[in-house]
Amino acid sequence: MAEVVLRTLADDAGLGARIAIESAATGDWHVGEPADQRTIDALARAGYDGTHHRARQFDASDFPNLDLVVAFDRGQARILRNWAGSTTEQQKVRLLLEFAGDPSGQQDVPDPYYSDAAMFDRVLGMIERSTQALFRQLAPALRQGIR
């Protein structure tokens, strides 16, 4: 969801060519598969196209080439920081909800997998707020051509 939303924000702002956005999991159990149909449906209800997504696993060797690694929850963040080869790489890992400053203090994006369509929509709303806040931080540098 976050990849689709952030990519849409960047494309709509005319900045899509200036940013690389990729989604990757810490586990390998869905590699090559499309997004869950409930994810695709939630995205479609909100006006996004999630049909092109294919799952892949994060590769720790990518860390040096990345400016930011966004995790959905503290468990993912812990795994990613453990995979990082240096303190600098560990500091690239941030939680998505940090960007929106959730007033409830919630830190983790809930996994809607074992829930209903309403939960997928709720999670998408959280992701939209956070990715919009993230994009507002990134956009000035992207407009200047700075990575």
Image: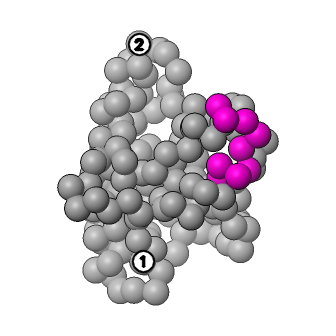
Q: Residue at x 41, y 45 (%)?
A: 6
Q: Which residue is mark 2?
A: 144
- In the image, residue 118 sits, relative to residue 142, either above or below, namely below
**Quadrant of the rendered structure where residue 48 is?**
bottom left
Camera-near label (2 vs 1) is 1
Q: Secondary structure at mark 2?
A: helix
Front residue of 19/137: it is 137
Front residue of 29/40: it is 29
Amino acid type of the residue that numbered disc 1 sits on in the rendered structure:
Pro
Q: Residue at x 23, y 62 (%)?
A: 104
Asked whether residue 123 is in view, the answer is yes
Q: Residue furthest top?
A: 144
Front residue of 139/69: it is 69
Q: Position of residue 93 (x, y in %)?
A: 56, 44
Q: Position of residue 59 (x, y in %)?
A: 75, 50
Q: Secondary structure at mark 1?
A: loop
Q: Residue at x 42, y 77 (%)?
A: 112
Q: Which residues are magenta?
A: 80-88
